[in-house]
Image: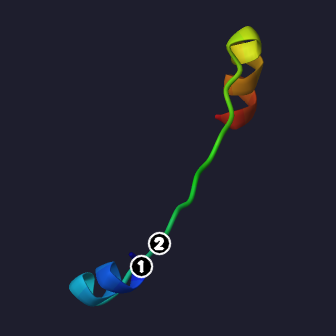
Amino acid sequence: AFSKINKILDSIDIVINNAGILDERRWEREIAVNI
């Protein structure tokens, strides 16, 4: 995917990868930690 986008746009200034977790019982704490 990265190579294809790089060819289409000619350059990429920034790439962001984000992942998080969410547990229904402790969602307020996890939102505070992940955001």
Residue 26, percent across and down? 76, 14
* Quarter of the rendering occupied by the N terminus: bottom left
> As rendered, which of 10 and 25 lies closer to the eye?
25
Q: Residues within 10 Å of mark 1 (few under 14, many from 20)?
A: few
Mark seen at residue 14: 2
Q: Which residue is mark 1?
A: 2
Label 1's element?
A: helix
Question: What amino acid is at disc 1?
Answer: Phe
Question: What amino acid is at disc 2?
Answer: Ile
Q: Taking 30 as reference, is 25 above or below it? A: above
Q: Residues within 10 Å of mark 2 (few under 14, many from 20)?
A: few
Q: Taking 27 as reference, is 8 above or below it? A: below
Q: Nearer the viewer, mark 1 or mark 2?
A: 1
Q: What residue is at 41 percent from the left and 79 percent from the top?
A: 2
> As rendered, which of 31 and 26 lies closer to the eye?
26
Residue 30, percent across and down? 73, 25
- For residue 28, side relative to residue 12 (left or right): right
Residue 11, percent across and down? 34, 87
Mark seen at residue 35: none
Q: Taking 26 as reference, is 32 above or below it? A: below
Q: What residue is at 62 percent from the left and 47 percent from the top?
A: 19
Q: What residue is at 67 percent from the left and 26 percent from the top?
A: 22
Most extreme residue toward the top, as rendered? 25
* Quarter of the rendering occupied by the C terminus: top right
Q: Earlier in the sequence, mark 1 or mark 2?
A: 1
Q: How far is the residue under mark 1 from the one under mark 2?
A: 12 Å
Label 2's element?
A: loop
Q: What residue is at 31 percent from the left and 79 percent from the top?
A: 5
Q: Taking 17 as reference, is 35 above or below it? A: above
